[in-house]
């Protein structure tokens, strides 16, 4: 127990601290300071001129910041609080609790017409009308969820806007430890914030994706650029001004920046985002093996002169690996010619492919190098191919690209991908539905009307199946002046007809 004298001394020290703090806050009001004026006593000595290399680096930082920042958005999310989020204290003390809560994060503009890449955890649980996007120029839009993938923590949302500035996406396979990077986002509610650091490590597995089945893909880029809550979904950019990662997590005991942050490599994010935009979900392929990292002891036991690669421990019965002739004890060294150094890196490389895709593996077995071609499968008997995903991925209209529409201005009509109810109504597994036609436009003159479904196109000798809106956009947007395309349509009464559209001059 402290003596009375010690207690009095402690109180005196705290009092001094409070007084000193008050003086600091008031800015030394007793000092007679003013702005510098001609003849001022303040120094006007010549500034130091940094070496040329330093100035070039400084200029690079400012140029990259100016290029990347307009492509990063602020995302505000309103979600509902469920009963299992209530604490015992609320019930015990009968404290009223708001049924809604708000959070925020960042996102990266992918396309000029409003597709935005972010983290799934930023938008998870959002109310139907609960996502707002604020652009760098302060414009605000409501957004809808296009798709989410929990295994990679990637999500895509869409705003109805045009002429946006998409981010330039780089190649994360080329990233090297030690190179300079900038993190751009909205930490702690501070919009359009840029921090700098280096790439600290590659292929990090920090077990942040809570997946009990072990299907989460963690192959993070580690950086010491300051990342805080709110940076999630923002850009990690290299000095070329290209996004090489999606800032996702931090290593911290306080919930704030303590030196290290982690970003999903952009190559992985691009593959997932593309699938989410096209089909509403990402269908991932699997080899069907249980694996472990190599080390010096395992390598020595197997007669391998290096301890990189991944050891195959066992195989899933009827899995792709077993059918391809992979055996327990094999060491996988490369996937499609690219070396794999760890188990999570192998998962990441294979995880960018779909069921039905083929991958080439270089393996070490019994003192011999050999190549194996593996046709990937879906997990746990989920034999979904990419084709079936196209037809079945729109079951949730509110969380898929079926709710996104696009206006073909030069043709004069608006369309979107069929939703679940419309696929049943028209007895179709593919197609886009016309939702609006401008009077006296080319589409109007050709016979297009709201309610008509476009499901096929013919151009030259090619027959093109129109599964979803992106395919129709690609076809029409690439139609040159004077070129024509024959569209096969289905009316609400079930009639199947052809109409013709012609490319317009710019």
Image (cartoon, rainbow, N blue to C red):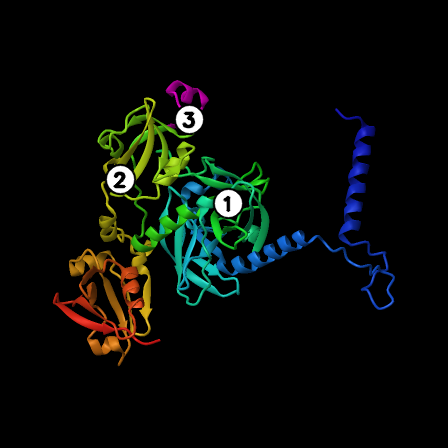
- Image spot of residue 43 (x, y percent): 84, 59
- Image spot of residue 273 (x, y percent): 37, 51
Q: Mark 3 sits on what residue?
A: 294
Q: Are marks 2 and 3 in contact (CB under 8 Å)?
A: no
Image side of residue 140 versus residue 44, left or right: left
Q: Residues within 10 Å of mark 1 (few under 14, many from 20)?
A: few
Q: Mark 1 sits on what residue?
A: 95
Q: Mark 2 sits on what residue?
A: 378
Of the residues under marks 2 and 3, which one precedes in the sequence?
3
Q: Residues within 10 Å of mark 2 (few under 14, many from 20)?
A: many
Closer to the camera, 393 or 126? 393
Q: Nearer the viewer, mark 2 or mark 1?
A: 2
Mark 2 and mark 3: span between their CA atoms? 26 Å
Which residue is found at the position 34% from the left and 55% from the top? 277
Q: Secondary structure at mark 1?
A: loop
Q: Which mark is residue 342?
A: none
Mark 1 and mark 3: span between their CA atoms? 54 Å
- Image spot of residue 25 (x, y percent): 75, 52
């Amino acid at each position: 127990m402290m003596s009375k004298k010690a207690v009095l001394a402690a109180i005196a020290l705290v009092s001094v601290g409070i007084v000193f703090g008050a003086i600091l806050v008031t800015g030394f009001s007793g000092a007679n300071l003013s702005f510098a004026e001609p003849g001022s006593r303040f120094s006007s000595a010549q500034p130091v001129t940094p070496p040329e290399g330093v100035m070039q680096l400084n200029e690079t930082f400012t140029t990259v910041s100016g290029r990347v920042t307009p492509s990063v958005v602020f995302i505000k999310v309103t979600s509902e609080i469920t009963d299992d989020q209530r604490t015992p204290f609320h019930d015990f003390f009968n404290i009223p609790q708001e049924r809604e809560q708000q959070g925020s994060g960042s996102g990266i503009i992918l396309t000029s017409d409003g597709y935005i890449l972010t983290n799934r955890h930023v938008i998870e649980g959002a109310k139907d009308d609960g996502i707002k996007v604020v652009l760098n120029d302060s414009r605000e839009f409501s957004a809808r969820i296009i798709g989410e993938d929990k295994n990679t923590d990637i999500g895509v949302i869409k705003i109805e806007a045009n002429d946006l500035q998409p981010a330039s996406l780089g190649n994360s396979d080329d990233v090297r430890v030690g190179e300079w990077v900038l993190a751009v986002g909205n930490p702690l509610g501070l919009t359009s914030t840029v921090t700098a650091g280096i790439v600290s490590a590659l292929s990090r597995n920090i077990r942040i994706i809570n997946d009990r089945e072990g299907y989460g893909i963690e192959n993070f880029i580690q950086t010491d650029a300051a990342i805080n809550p709110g940076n999630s979904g923002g850009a990690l950019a290299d000095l070329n001004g290209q996004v090489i990662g999606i800032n996702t997590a931090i290593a911290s005991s306080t919930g704030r920046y303590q030196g290290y942050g982690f970003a999903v490599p952009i190559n992985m994010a691009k593959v997932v985002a593309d699938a989410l935009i096209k089909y509403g979900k990402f269908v991932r392929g699997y080899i069907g093996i249980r694996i472990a990292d190599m080390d010096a002891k395992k390598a020595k036991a197997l007669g391998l002169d290096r301890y990189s690669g991944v050891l195959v421990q066992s195989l899933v019965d009827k899995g792709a690996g077993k059918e391809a002739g992979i055996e327990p004890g094999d060491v996988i060294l490369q996937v499609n010619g690219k070396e794999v150094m760890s188990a999570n890196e192998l998962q990441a490389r294979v995880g960018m492919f779909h069921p039905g895709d083929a991958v080439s593996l270089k393996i070490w077995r019994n003192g011999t190098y050999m190549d194996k071609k593996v046709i990937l499968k879906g997990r746990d008997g989920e034999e979904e191919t990419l084709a079936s995903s196209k037809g079945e991925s729109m079951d949730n209209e509110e969380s898929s690209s079926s709710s996104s529409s696009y206006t073909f201005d030069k043709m004069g009509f608006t369309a979107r991908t069929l939703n679940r109810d419309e696929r049943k109504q028209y007895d179709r597994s593919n197609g886009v539905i016309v939702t609006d036609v401008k009077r006296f436009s080319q589409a109007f003159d050709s016979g297009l009307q709201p309610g008509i479904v476009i499901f096929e196109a013919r151009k030259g000798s090619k027959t093109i199946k129109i599964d979803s809106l992106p395919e129709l956009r690609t076809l029409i947007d690439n139609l040159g002046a004077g070129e024509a395309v024959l569209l096969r349509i289905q009316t609400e009464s079930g009639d199947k007809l052809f109409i013709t559209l012609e490319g317009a001059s710019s």
